[in-house]
Amino acid sequence: MEGEIINKVANSVLEIFDLEDYYPKGNRVELDISQWLLGGFLLREKDFREHLKNHDWSQYQDAYVAVFCSTDAIVPAWASILVTIHLSPFAKKIVSGTLEDLETSLYEEILPNVDYSKFEGKPVIIKGCSKKPVPMSAYVLASQKLQPFARSIMYGEACSAVPLYKKSK
């Protein structure tokens, strides 16, 4: 049939590795401990402990929480640990750092457990456009995990993928 449009991407052997498929569902929260410091900078232990005691920790039920300090305060290590102790009965996961650190930690747990053998000898595109906050570190880790299996690795979309790796023959 003349003029028929053929979707070559749909008919190809290309495998799409979409990191969003592995994105764990759940609320993400940043918890800034500077809110419990005097003027945002000075930790007074008695006041700090009192703030933690009176805080509603149930709001973090089943959430992924990134604990950080938004100011340049010098905060003793035990402060974040104590916040974690209060969060632990409620949160799914707690990390020290930003939301990007949290996402990195989640992917570092998930990606090593993926069965990459289904990509054996196949050209793979690591999907580039993402609606979810997939950190760059997840793309780096995924490429490392895919490389021993894939015949080739590209990045982006099927219509405009950037070649990254090709297994030598």
Image (cartoon, rainbow, N blue to C red):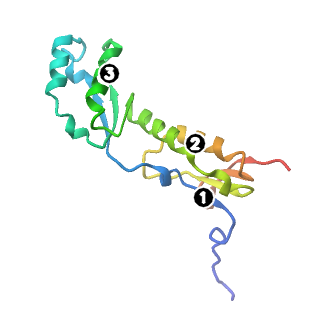
Amino acid at circle 1: Ile
Helix, strand or loop for disc 1: strand
Residue 140's mark?
Answer: none
Tell which circle, 3 or 2, labels the residue nearer the N-terminal end: 3
- N-term mark: 2 or 1: 1
Residue identifier under label 1: 16
Q: Would residue 17 appear left or right of 42 to someone viewing this image? A: right
User: Of the residues tagged 2 and 1, which is closer to the observer?
Assistant: 2
Quick one: label 3 or label 1, which is nearer the N terminus?
1
Identified by mark 3, the residue type is: Ser
| Image disc number at residue 80 | 3
Residue 136 place in picture, x, y as percent: 53, 39
Q: Locate residue 24 relative to residue 63 in the image: left or right.
A: right
Q: Quadrant of residue 9?
A: bottom right
- Gap between marks 3 and 1, in whole Å? 39 Å
C-alpha distance separating marks 3 and 2: 28 Å
Secondary element at image label 3: helix
Instruction: Kindly identify the residue that appears in the image at 21 percent across and 23 percent down.
Output: 35
Residue picked out by circle 2: 112
Pick the quarter of the image with the N terminus: bottom right
